[in-house]
């Protein structure tokens, strides 16, 4: 079994990324916005729990947003910061105890397919007029809408998850000739040739199919699906289809590559740490947040720890036209039975997602707005002065299907990384795929 030295990981764990499943435990902050426990001029105090969506996970940034909101509306907002490692458990415990927050910031797989599907969320359809529906990205709005027609998430931002490469290392190995750097794409044939060149030059693994848990699993799914055009679910999001022979072929090819290791000791954040310190030369868990400031280490955009250049790349596909996993983040309201707080929470959502203040809310998320206009405020130029964001925007047209709202999603994610571990330990790709895809479909009621 191909392995990556564990001691190198230990040296870099402090840099592991929250967005790929790492991060500290949750913390709460009242700041200047929460010090007045009796609320603002209208007497309302709300609670917001936020996953680490860009700088929405940073108290200093969020306090400024909450201060501005209070000044505008008189509504006080107390904030608690969740980590992906245990955030779901905290929310589920709060729901079970009748202590859910008023507002939450995360994605449709949680707000729509999980808590919305279970009846915990407020339908936000009344916040969307015809102009909103026309302006918001159709795929994003569809993902935020339950099969019942209820809108359980009001979307704010989106991105395309991709992979990152150490361009200097590729050049050193003569593998850069296989990259289309103008469009940030490559074909499956070019990827395989590049992996051969990289292994021949460095003599060790340069990439990892991490499978220590679900953190960053969007990367391994996209890698496998894109290599030969396989899918993860059907278009209706009712059946898991990763037992497609195209996916089996992709998993087998990756297993056979000397340059790639199946590594059950790593999750996405761990992989990023090893990429960042140049132990690995590629990362499959990557997006614009990392590109802007790799691992939050404040060494500048597009650079590894030692200053080498990081380039975002679409996942390789046979025709060079990838279908990238999308990330969508927005706000939902838990139905705690208090109509006054629900109304105040809706005011909060419209302020953050559809007003002049949306510019600051989007910039705090460090992703791309889901709409071009917010009540007359132009959002199309939010990142006009940011060279990194402009270059990364070339990947946005490659966004593929947002299938994370399929029934049984939580169980399917667990089955996916367990399957990768089984491939690693047994080498029997077909059997592992059949077993674990079957488990996912059983969870989906199929």
Image (spheres, rainbow, N blue to C red):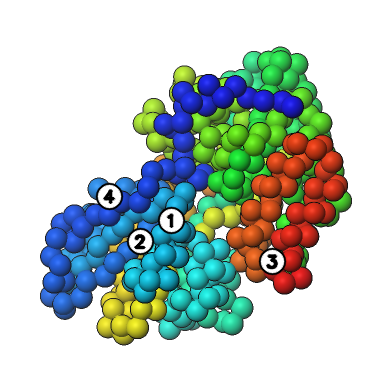
Q: Quadrant of the N terminus?
A: top right
Percent x, y of residue 258: 77, 25
Percent x, y of residue 310: 54, 30
Percent x, y of residue 167: 60, 25
Whichever of callouts 3 and 4 sits on the residue coming sooner in the sequence is 4
Whichever of callouts 3 and 1 sits on the residue coming sooner in the sequence is 1
Whichever of callouts 2 and 4 sits on the residue coming sooner in the sequence is 2
- Badge 1: how crowded within 10 Å, few (<14), some, or many (20+)? some
Distance from the alpha carbon under mark 2 to that under mark 4:
12 Å
Task: Write down the residue under mark 1.
Answer: 87
Distance from the alpha carbon under mark 4 to that under mark 1:
17 Å
SS for dot 2: strand
Tell me which residue sits at (27%, 49%) in the image. Answer: 59
* Left or right of 257, for residue 20: left
- Of marks 4 and 1, the one in the foreground: 1
Distance from the alpha carbon under mark 3 to that under mark 4:
38 Å
| 126 vs 95: above or below | below
- Of marks 2 and 1, the one in the foreground: 1
Distance from the alpha carbon under mark 2 to that under mark 3:
28 Å
* Left or right of 16, for residue 311: right
Distance from the alpha carbon under mark 3 to that under mark 1:
22 Å
Q: Which mark is residue 59?
A: 4
- Badge 2: how crowded within 10 Å, few (<14), some, or many (20+)? many
Task: Write down the residue under mark 2.
Answer: 49
Whichever of callouts 4 and 1 sits on the residue coming sooner in the sequence is 4
* Left or right of 167, for residue 382: left
Q: Quadrant of residue 35?
A: bottom left
Q: Quadrant of the C terminus?
A: bottom right
SS for dot 4: helix
Q: Nearer the viewer, residue 46 or 130?
A: 46
The reply to whether dot 2 and dot 1 touch (C-beta < 8 Å) is yes
């Amino acid at each position: 079994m191909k392995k990556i030295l564990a001691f190198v990981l230990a040296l870099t764990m402090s840099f592991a990324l929250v967005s790929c499943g790492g991060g500290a435990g949750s913390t709460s902050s009242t700041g200047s916005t929460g010090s007045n426990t009796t609320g603002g001029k209208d007497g309302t105090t709300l609670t917001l729990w936020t996953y680490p969506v860009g700088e929405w996970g940073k108290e200093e940034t969020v306090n400024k947003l909450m201060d501005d909101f209070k000044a505008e509306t008189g509504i006080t907002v107390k904030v608690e910061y969740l980590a992906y490692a245990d955030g779901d458990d905290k929310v589920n415990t709060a729901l079970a105890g009748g202590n859910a927050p008023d507002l939450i910031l995360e994605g449709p797989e949680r707000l729509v397919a999980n808590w919305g599907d279970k009846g915990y969320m407020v339908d936000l359809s009344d916040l969307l007029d015809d102009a909103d529906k026309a302006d918001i990205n159709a795929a994003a709005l569809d993902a935020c809408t339950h099969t019942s027609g209820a809108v359980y998430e009001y979307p704010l931002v989106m991105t395309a998850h991709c992979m990152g490469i150490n361009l200097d290392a590729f050049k050193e190995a003569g593998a850069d000739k296989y990259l289309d750097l103008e469009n940030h794409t490559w074909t499956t044939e070019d990827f395989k040739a590049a992996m051969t060149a990289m292994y021949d030059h460095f003599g060790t693994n340069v990439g990892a199919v991490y499978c220590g848990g679900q953190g960053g699993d969007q990367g391994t799914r996209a890698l496998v699906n894109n290599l030969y055009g396989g899918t993860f679910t059907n278009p209706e999001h009712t059946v898991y289809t990763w037992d497609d022979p195209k996916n089996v072929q992709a998993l087998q090819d990756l297993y056979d590559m000397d340059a790639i290791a199946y590594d059950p000791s790593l999750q996405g954040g761990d992989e990023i740490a090893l990429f960042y310190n140049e132990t690995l030369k590629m990362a499959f868990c990557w997006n614009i947040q990392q590109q802007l400031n790799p691992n939050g280490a404040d060494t500048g955009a597009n650079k590894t720890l030692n200053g080498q250049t990081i380039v975002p790349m679409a996942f390789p596909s046979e025709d060079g036209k990838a279908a990238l996993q999308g990330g969508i983040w927005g706000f939902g309201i838990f139905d705690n039975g208090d109509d006054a707080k629900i109304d105040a929470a809706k005011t909060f959502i419209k302020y953050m997602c559809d007003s002049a203040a949306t510019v600051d809310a989007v910039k705090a998320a460090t992703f791309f707005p889901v709409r071009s206009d917010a009540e007359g405020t132009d959002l199309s130029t939010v990142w006009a002065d940011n060279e990194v964001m402009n270059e990364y925007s070339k990947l946005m047209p490659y966004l593929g299907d947002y299938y994370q709202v399929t029934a049984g999603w939580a169980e399917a994610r667990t089955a996916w990384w367990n399957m990768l571990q089984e491939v690693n330990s047994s080498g029997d790709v077909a059997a592992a795929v059949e077993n674990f895809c079957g488990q996912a479909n059983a969870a989906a009621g199929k």
